[in-house]
Amino acid sequence: MSDEPIAPTDLAPPPVMPPPVVTPPPLLPPKPVTTGWVFTLLKTVLTVLVVALITAGMILLHKMTGWEGIWKVTLIGTCGLFAILSVLVIVGGALDVRKLLHRLRERESSSESDSGD
């Protein structure tokens, strides 16, 4: 072994790396307004408005006629809602029975044609 220092073999300066190219993110178009939350907000506002109007009407009715007027309106209103609901159930049930009979006729006619072949 010798005491002489080892001479460097590469005397060139280190390579310079170019700065990284930073590209800005692409501009995204604005998000369209989703109709889901808009309709939910609209339903909520309308519900609050209807409840407020009914409450104001009941307060005015109480001031004008007392409790008797409120109970009359409540009775007539619930009877009216029950009548509307009854009509809707009758009509809907009749349509369902009609659809059921139509499907049974189709099934019967298709099974007769299969058994005859």
Image: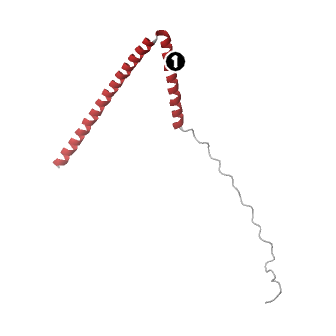
- Farthest residue in the left direction? 116
Q: Mark 1 belongs to which amino acid?
A: Ala
Residue 113: horizontal and vertical position, in percent?
19, 45
Residue extending farthest to the bottom is 1
Question: 98 or 68, which lies in front?
Answer: 68
Residue most extreme to the right: 4
Q: Is residue 89 left or right of residue 39?
A: left
Q: Residue at x 23, y 42 (%)?
A: 107
Q: Secondary structure at mark 1?
A: helix
Name the residue rendered at 77%, 67% in the picture. 16
Q: Position of residue 27 (x, y in %)?
A: 65, 47
Please state the horizontal and vertical placement of residue 1, each as a whole percent of the image: 78, 90
Report the coloring of the rendering: secondary structure
Up the image or down, 14 lies above or below 111; here it is: below
The extreme front residue here reads: 67
The one of 95 and 83 positioned closer to us in this rendering: 83
Camera-side residue of 7 and 94: 7
- Residue 10 image offset from top left, x and y in percent: 79, 78
Q: Quadrant of residue 68?
A: top left
**Residue depicted at 19% across the width and 48% down the height:** 114
Badge 1 crowding class, 10 Å Cα cut-off, few under 14, some 14 to 19, many 20 or more, is: few
Q: Is residue 69 above or below residue 13?
A: above
Judge left or right: residue 29 versus residue 112.
Answer: right
The image shows a total of numbered marks equal to: 1
> Which residue is labeled 1 in the image?
56
